[in-house]
Structures are given as structure tokens and as C-alpha cells.
Image (spheres, rainbow, N blue to C red):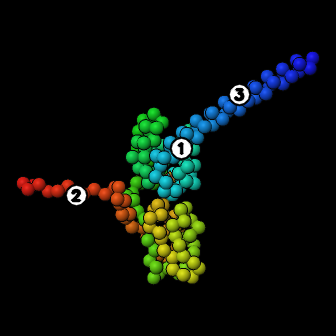
Amino acid sequence: MLWLTLIGLALLCTGIGYGFSRLSASGNQSDVLVERINDCLPQTQCAQCNFPGCRPYAEAIATGQANINQCPPGGDSTIEALAEVLGVPVVALNVDYGTHKEPQVAFIDEAACIGCTLCIPPCPVDAIIGSTKLMHTVIAEDCTGCELCIEPCPVDCISLVPAKPEVSQWRYPKPARAHD
Ligand code: SF4
Ligand code: SF4
Ligand code: SF4
């Protein structure tokens, strides 16, 4: 009788182990999908997609809770990349979430800044430095141009300026030909 009980316990443990490994495998697959989707997103962390950041939006797409056309900073190129990853048709950007703009960064007019620090908490990437009652400044290399610091500033001393292209994006102008 004892050996029958032991065999039963062994079978039960094997079954539970198999169930956990199946769950873990499907969890890994969905993690991989979320990562692939997240890699297509511009990481601006602006929340215009109605999710608190790019990864939550990626998770929502992976579970079918969001469409692929809700990211204005990514625009058409992001939609195309997402469509390829998911094997779905390319669709137009849903302008209810905003319109696509060229890359931009925040700039603080340091002479006008009163050092209230209100712009620091909304910045999702800690790109603003400064202390209470001292002027603040933006670390342009870290700024994603998300615009979340604009509205909290009580003296409107933050503006957005075009981002300089990175070296990898820079192209020589096409040389003019002699007969042009
Ligand atoms: S709108 Fe795009 S860039 Fe902004 S948080 Fe959502 S996915 Fe990220
Ligand atoms: S500095 Fe402003 S625009 Fe730049 S990432 Fe931070 S909150 Fe966004
Ligand atoms: S919110 Fe405006 S005034 Fe206040 S610290 Fe930031 S830039 Fe300066």
C-alpha cells in the first residue's frame, strides 16, 4: 500500500512540474514578444499612447489590448516595424493620440528659471538637473523630447527645440553635379 502511495505522489509531482514548465515556457514566449515590440518603440516615455511608458504599451499590444498605431513619436516607421513583428497590416497613425513630430529636446531659459523644481518629477528619464531656487538645465543627450516638463513650469521658461541628429543619422549633402 505504501509503495502505491509513493508512486501516486511521484506522478503528482511530475504532473505539477510539467505544468509549471509549460507555464514558464509560455511566459518566456510572451516576454520575448513584449521585448521585440518594445524594441520597435522610440523610448520617448511620453505616455501619448495612453500608457505610462513604452514598455506598458508594448505589453498592451502583446496582449491585444492596444493597437499598433498609438505612438505619435514613432510615427509611420514604428507602425511598419510593429506590423512586421506581429504579421499584421500596416495602418495609419491614429491622430487621436497626437501627430508625429521631428525629434526634439527641451531647452530651459536659465535666466528666467526660478528654481522651483516642478519640472524635475515629471521627467521620465531624469534629464533635468538643478536645485531649489537655483537655475535648472536639461541634459540634451538624455532628453527624449517627451514634453512632460513643459506644462508644470510656472514661468514658461522651457521650450522644445529640434534635436541635433546623431552621428549615425547624419548624411553628407548630395554633391551638386557640374551640369546641374
Ligand atoms: S507614445 Fe510611443 S514613445 Fe510615447 S510612451 Fe507611448 S510608446 Fe513610448
Ligand atoms: S527634459 Fe522634459 S522633454 Fe526632456 S525628457 Fe525630461 S520631461 Fe521630457
Ligand atoms: S519648472 Fe521652470 S522655473 Fe521651475 S525649475 Fe523647472 S525650468 Fe525652472
What quarter of the picture does the C terminus occupy? Answer: bottom left
Q: Is residue 162 above or below residue 54?
A: below
Residue that numbered label 1 is attached to = 35
| Residue that appears at 57% across and 78% down | 131
Residue that numbered label 2 is attached to = 173
Q: Residues within 10 Å of mark 2 (few under 14, many from 20)?
A: few
**Residue 26 location, quadrant:** top right
SS of the residue under disc 3 = helix
| Residue that appears at 24% across and 57% down | 172
The kind of residue tagged 1 is Glu
| Residue that appears at 60% across and 37% down | 28
Q: Position of residue 123 (x, y in %)?
A: 54, 65
- Kindly indicate whether the residue at mark 3 contacts the one at mark 1 (C-beta within 8 angstroms): no
Q: How far apart, in angstroms, are the residues tagged by discs 2 and 3?
A: 60 Å
SS of the residue under disc 1 = helix
Q: Is residue 28 above or below residue 96?
A: above
Q: Residues within 10 Å of mark 3 (few under 14, many from 20)?
A: few
**In the orientation shown, which residue stands out farthest toward the right?**
1
- Kindly indicate whether the residue at mark 2 contacts the one at mark 1 (C-beta within 8 angstroms): no
SS of the residue under disc 2 = loop
Can residue 65 be seen in this snapshot?
Answer: no
Q: Position of residue 116 (x, y in %)?
A: 57, 78
| Residue that appears at 93% across and 17% down | 1
Residue that numbered label 3 is attached to = 18
